[in-house]
Amino acid sequence: MINMNISKIEPTEEKLLHFTKLPTHIAITMDGNGRWAENHQVTRMEGHQAGSKAFLKVIERMVQYKIKIISMFAFSTENWSRPEDEVNNLMQLSREFITDNLNLIHKYNIKVNHLGNLNKLPNDLQSKINESIEMTKNNTGTIINIAFDYGGKQDIVNAVKKIVAEGMPIENINEESISNKLATANMPDPDLIIRPGGELRISNFLIWQAAYAEYYFTSTLWPDFNAQEVDYALTEFSKRERRFGKTKD
Ligand code: FPP
């Protein structure tokens, strides 16, 4: 964990002033469930279950801070190569998560969105995800992008395919036209990417969109990531000076 000497910040409007700026879009790679399970001598499935509890707590904190967009990396295109049991368990956990929490998510005025391939998921999980999107489509609060069977390279390949299929004239192809064909079309790029679990890599998450994101890495394992860890990340973000390739003013 990055060692910062800050006191616990309560999510009140007044204390929000502790952050000089907040990100509009935060992306999180939820990593470390397996190692957490090992440390606690429980099954990997129990590690993922603990990870799904952290997922809810972190969302709640960010909703309190009125973060506009949160992108959560729940299952990558590469995760299909995990043992079949683990893949099935992750599908089951996702079903349970939606069943148990959809009403609460709706009550929080969250709008659910999906990034990635829906069609490779089990039919009933596809239906549950679609139900979440439909139920929350008119909500006006935080947008949560659930990246489930998502890969950044594949996102770019799909964008190129759409551009070619549309026959877009070559002179119209630019950064904006490509961005508009990605899974995150019409959304601002992430300002902050959080990666718990101690690994210092991006693992194919929103790779195009991450071009100018600020990165926050911590060795805290995802199931231990909580409201206070969100505060650490936001405090760190508010100290960063973003220049987007320009010189300092
Ligand atoms: C990476 O940890 C985590 C995953 C591949 C799954 C993430 C899923 C959740 C947190 C469950 C919540 C999601 C939903 C949609 C309910 P790892 O297994 O790679 O950990 P390790 O690197 O320590 O082995």
Image: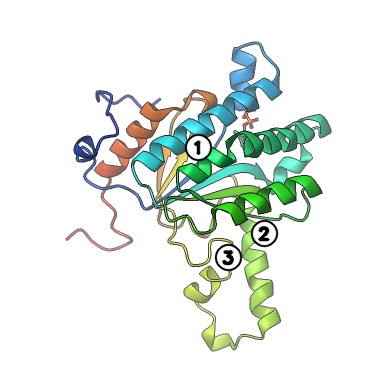
- The residue nearer to you, when weighing 226 against 65, is 65
Asked which secondary structure carries label 1, the reply is: loop
Label 1, label 2: how many angstroms apart (C-alpha)?
21 Å
Asked if disc 2 is less than 8 Å from ligand 1, the answer is no
Q: Which residue is drawn at 45% across and 43% down?
A: 108
Which numbered mark, 3 or 1, is in the foreground of this view?
3
Closer mark to the observer between disc 2 and disc 3:
3
Residue at the right extreme?
Answer: 84
Position in image of residue 22 (x %, y %): 30, 47
First reached walking from the N terminus: tag 1 or tag 2: 2
Circle on res. 182: 3
Q: Real-space Cα distance between discs 3 and 1?
A: 25 Å
Residue closest to the eye, 150 or 63? 63
From this view, report whether residue 12 is shown above or below residue 207: above
Residue 54 pos. (x, y %): 52, 29
Position of 167 compared to 110: left or right? right
User: Observer-nearest residue: 188 or 156?
Assistant: 188
Is label 3 in a helix, a strand or a loop? loop
Amino acid of disc 3: Leu
Q: Which residue, given by chain and number where applicable, does mark 1 sit on?
A: 200
Q: In this view, does 127 lie to the left or right of 210?
A: right
Residue 154 is labelled as 2
How far apart in space, not on screen, are marks 2 and 3 (Cα)?
10 Å
Across and down, in percent, residue 74 comes to: 61, 41
